[in-house]
Image: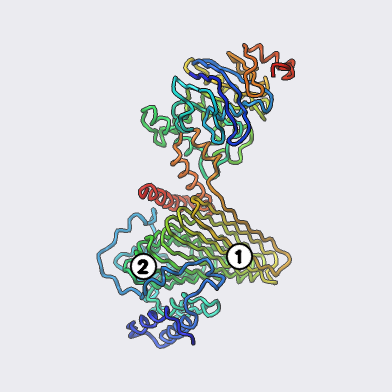
């Protein structure tokens, strides 16, 4: 699904952030990438999604065997890659439903599926809300406008559910959530796990992993993956802190 | 008197007009107005109010008033309001009764052309010939007072609430000619109405409109205007509103067309506790230039002004916002704010924005702000990261930018949708031309 080899990247006209990342994710797997602040977690997420402002200086990233880095952000999304933003953007004047229908229809066109009209879309939305057990209170508002932190993250999960990506990268989706919001978001993520779908959870804390059990855990430090293991690695990190990276970092 | 070469053709047009049968007071008023125009000449960039305006297009031809147009019926369907209205249609500044659809007006409502009104309702003549242009050195308002042929008049008796909107469609059709429109809106105490004006056509045509608005205590008027003329059109419009006690005037201007456009809205608060909301959006590209100039005179206490104007400027277009708010010493408890937001989509696009607050009372709340910026990169990326192609993402953000201005109009879904539809038409035109 995703194969990253020796990926080096820097901030455009800035310092090098990623210094040789290797990562392979198979369909159906959930990988957690953990690491201290400034280790390059969000840079990795941004580069996978095509966020402007970064420059890949070395290495490759293949998505379903295609050169991911050669695609524009919108092409990646239509090809089935989804980034849940750490800081979802507020877009005043763009209605959440209008936005999501435009996005879903763009993805459907790409898949060769018929576009949904307003009625069909509403039906699909209602079904998905029910499945995720979330309310419809955010739908008629501007995209993320005036949403609380929890509401924004809930909106990201809802978008992910509607767009049905093959590979989802969730960038610190757990940060800033109280325990109820965290449960809601984790519940959404678990419901979207499937043998066809891969997920990469980027997180600072082990907390989310109490609710979403990862297949693999990687520790990112100073732009490199310094440790990989199963879910027990997360627990060990929680106990000992990132200081345990010590010399490895 | 200084002779200005540019005024001479209009003197010639004035002398050539046949106005047999007009009463002598009207002829006198016209002559005096023409003399004021000749004394002023065209405004120049030395005048603060016209500093940012390029009058070049107006000098390229002599836009004498158009003659009566008897040509075939135009297709106006795309501009018509989506719900039933009391509709007047004017072509080249003259009412065309065969195209009007006034329907049944409630008792106490008068809706007619200006020319007809001058004959039938001498009581309204004084307001129609209002000579406030004397005060402000308004050359084009003076010219309008000299040359106007027609326009529209709407009056409501006290207490009348007009359920359906009044719709006025102005079509400019004669090239190198002008529509000199003079109109009057008068609402009696507690009366309420909605007016939708659309200006369309106008290839190589000059529209020069002067509208007087009088709201008696407690009256409320919503006044929406769409200017979607050809890119070769010149469009000048002045609305002068006098607001008595506890009135509400809400104006919205959607400026999409015209090569050179200027919308001037002057509000005079003449009674306590009145409110005005002046809103609008201009979307400009190519060589278009559009000015919105607001002049609000707080001459009475406890009045409220809300101004919210947005401009989208692409290619080599030029947007101008002039916002003057004067608060006189007696106008305590004035609450006024003004916001002008500009979106520059091209390195050669320009905007000038000039707020001007003159405050002579001490117990007031006044604020103003202006922003100039590009499309929000993080918002663009967010949309693209959901699969929306970049061109569509840009379009959504431009539409949203204009929508924020449209949403300032309170509680009128039909009007919101009507204006939003025309914004989308403007965006579609972009793709057609590309």
Cα–Cα gap, marks 2 and 1: 37 Å
The quarter of the displayed image where residue B288 is located: bottom left
Which residue is painted at 33% across and 56% down in the image? B77
Front: mark 2 or 1: 2
The x, y position of residue B121, in whole percent, is 42, 78
The x, y position of residue B322, in whole percent, is 56, 64
Residue labelled with disc 1: B274
Is residue A91 placed above or below B331 in the rendered structure?
above
Which residue is painted at 47% across and 31% down in the image? A125
The quarter of the displayed image where residue B236 is located: bottom left
Q: Mark 2 lies on which chain?
A: B
Q: Count the labels in the image.
A: 2
Identify which residue, B383 or A36, lies in the foreground.
Answer: A36
Identify which residue, B353 or B316, lies in the foreground.
Answer: B316
Residue labelled with disc 2: B205
Discs 2 and 1 carry the same chain letter: yes
Give the left or right position of residue A236, taking residue A193 as reference.
right
Q: Is residue A19 visible?
A: yes
Badge 2 marks a residue whose secondary structure is loop
Determine crowd level at label 1: few under 14, some 14-19, many 20+ residues with C-alpha closer than 10 A.
many
Colouring mode (rainbow / by chain / secondary structure / one colour): rainbow
């Amino acid at each position: 699904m995703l194969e990253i080899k020796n990926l080096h990247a820097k901030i455009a006209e800035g310092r090098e952030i990623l210094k040789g990342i290797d990562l392979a994710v198979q369909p159906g797997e959930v990988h957690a990438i953990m690491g201290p602040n400034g280790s390059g977690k969000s840079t990795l997420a941004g580069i996978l999604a095509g966020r402007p402002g970064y420059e890949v200086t070395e290495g490759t990233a293949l998505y379903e065997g295609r050169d991911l880095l050669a695609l524009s952000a919108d092409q990646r999304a239509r090809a089935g890659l989804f980034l849940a933003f750490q800081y979802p953007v507020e877009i005043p004047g763009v209605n959440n439903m209008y936005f999501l229908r435009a996005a879903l229809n763009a993805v459907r066109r790409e898949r060769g599926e018929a576009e949904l009209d307003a009625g069909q879309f509403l039906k699909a939305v209602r079904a998905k809300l029910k499945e995720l057990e979330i309310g419809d209170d955010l739908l008629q508002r501007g995209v993320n406008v005036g949403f609380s932190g929890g509401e924004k993250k809930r909106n990201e999960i809802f978008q992910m559910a509607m767009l049905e990506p093959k590979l989802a990268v969730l960038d610190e989706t757990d940060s800033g959530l109280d325990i109820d919001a965290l449960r809601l978001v984790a519940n959404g993520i678990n419901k979207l796990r499937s043998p066809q779908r891969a997920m990469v959870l980027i997180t600072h804390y082990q907390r989310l992993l109490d609710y979403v059990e990862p297949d693999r855990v990687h520790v990112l430090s100073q732009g490199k993956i310094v440790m990989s293991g199963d879910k027990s690695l997360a627990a060990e990190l929680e106990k000992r802190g990132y200081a345990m990276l010590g010399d490895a970092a | 008197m200084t002779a200005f070469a540019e005024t001479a053709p209009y003197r010639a047009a004035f002398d050539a007009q046949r106005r047999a049968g007009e009463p002598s007071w009207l002829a006198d008023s016209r002559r005096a107005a023409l003399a004021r125009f000749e004394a002023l000449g065209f405004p120049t960039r030395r005048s603060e109010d016209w500093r940012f305006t390029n009058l070049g297009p107006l000098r390229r031809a002599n836009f004498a008033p158009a003659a009566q147009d008897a040509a075939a019926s135009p297709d106006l369907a795309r501009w018509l309001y989506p719900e039933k209205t009391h509709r007047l249609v004017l072509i080249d500044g003259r009412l065309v009764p065969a195209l009007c659809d006034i329907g049944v007006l409630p008792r106490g409502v008068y809706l007619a052309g200006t020319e007809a009104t001058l004959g039938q309702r001498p009581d309204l003549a004084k307001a129609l010939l209002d000579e406030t242009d004397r005060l402000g050195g308004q050359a084009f308002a003076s010219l309008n007072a000299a040359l106007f042929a027609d326009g529209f008049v709407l009056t409501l008796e006290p207490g009348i609430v007009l359920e359906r909107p009044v719709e006025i469609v102005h079509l400019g059709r004669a090239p190198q000619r002008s529509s000199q429109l003079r109109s009057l809106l008068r609402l009696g105490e507690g009366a309420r109405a909605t007016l939708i004006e659309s200006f369309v056509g106008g290839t190589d045509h000059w529209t020069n409109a002067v509208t007087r608005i009088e709201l008696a205590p407690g009256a409320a008027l919503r006044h929406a205007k769409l200017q979607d003329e050809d890119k070769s059109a010149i469009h000048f419009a002045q609305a002068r509103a006098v607001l008595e006690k506890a009135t509400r005037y809400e104006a919205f201007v959607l400026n999409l067309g015209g090569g050179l456009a200027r919308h001037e809205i002057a509000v005079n608060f003449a009674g306590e506790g009145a409110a005005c909301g002046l809103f609008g959006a201009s979307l400009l590209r190519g060589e278009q230039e559009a000015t919105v100039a607001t002049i609000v005179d707080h001459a009475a206490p406890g009045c409220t002004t809300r101004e919210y104007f947005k401009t989208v400027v692409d290619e080599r277009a030029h947007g101008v916002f002039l916002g003057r708010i004067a608060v006189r010493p007696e106008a305590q408890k004035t609450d006024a704010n003004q916001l002008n937001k500009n979106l520059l989509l091209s390195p050669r696009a320009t905007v000038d924005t000039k707020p001007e607050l003159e405050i002579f009372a001490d117990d007031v709340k006044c604020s103003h702000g202006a922003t100039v910026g590009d499309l929000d990169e993080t918002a663009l990326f967010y949309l693209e990261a959901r699969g929306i192609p970049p061109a569509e993402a840009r379009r959504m953000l431009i539409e949203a930018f204009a929508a924020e201005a449209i949403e300032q109009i309170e509680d009128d879904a039909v009007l919101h949708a009507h204006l939003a539809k025309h914004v989308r038409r403007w965006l579609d035109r972009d793709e057609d031309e590309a």
